[in-house]
Image: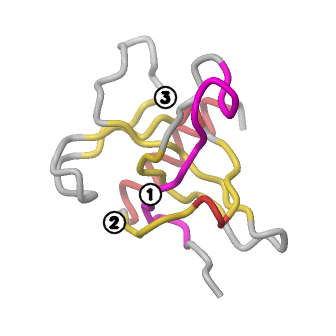
Amino acid sequence: MFRPLKKEIYWVTLGNPPKEVVGHEQAFTRPCLVVRSGHPSHVAIVIPITSKTPPSRHFAAVHLPEGIDDSGKDSYVLCFQVRAASYQRFGNKIGELNDDTYEEILTVLADYIGL
């Protein structure tokens, strides 16, 4: 059975506006980093990734250098957009982070949500 693992990056369908997303939520099919999986209900906690440079006010965006995923571009993990996603929303695996980068993202995420 399919089960994404932490540190892995997948294409994930987050929904299409205007019915499936609201406001400034990330939408469409985009790369997402898995930060937690294995829940009995087949849901993973993911963080969307974008190739667009976020405004400087978004301190909770972690830069990923070119080559981390299959986009061929620098990317940003949007720790302020963390969300749950059913395994049914997952597409192909496109990358995996090393331990140091993953730990940096977890630190930013914990700071952002106040842990």
From the image, tell me which residue sits under label 3.
60
Residue that badge 2 annotates: 95
Q: Is residue 19 above or below residue 28?
A: above
Q: Residue furthest right?
A: 40
Q: Indicate the quadrant where residue 17 lies.
A: top right
Foreground residue among 92 and 62: 92
Distance between the alpha carbons at the discs numbered 3 and 2: 21 Å
| Residue displayed at 53% across by 32% down | 26
In the image, residue 54 lies at what x, y percent? 36, 21
**Magenta stretch: helix, strand or loop mostly:** loop
Tell whether 42 sits left or right of 37. Answer: right
> Depth-wise, is mark 1 or mark 2 nearer the camera?
1
Residue density around tag 1, few if under 14, some if 14–19, many if 20 or more, within 10 Å: many
Q: Earlier in the sequence, mark 3 or mark 2?
A: 3
**1 in relation to 100, above or below:** below
- Residue bearing mark 1: 11
Q: Quadrant of residue 110?
A: top right
Identify the element where label 1 is drawn: strand
Instruction: Indicate which disc, 1 or 3, sits on the residue closer to the N terminus.
Output: 1
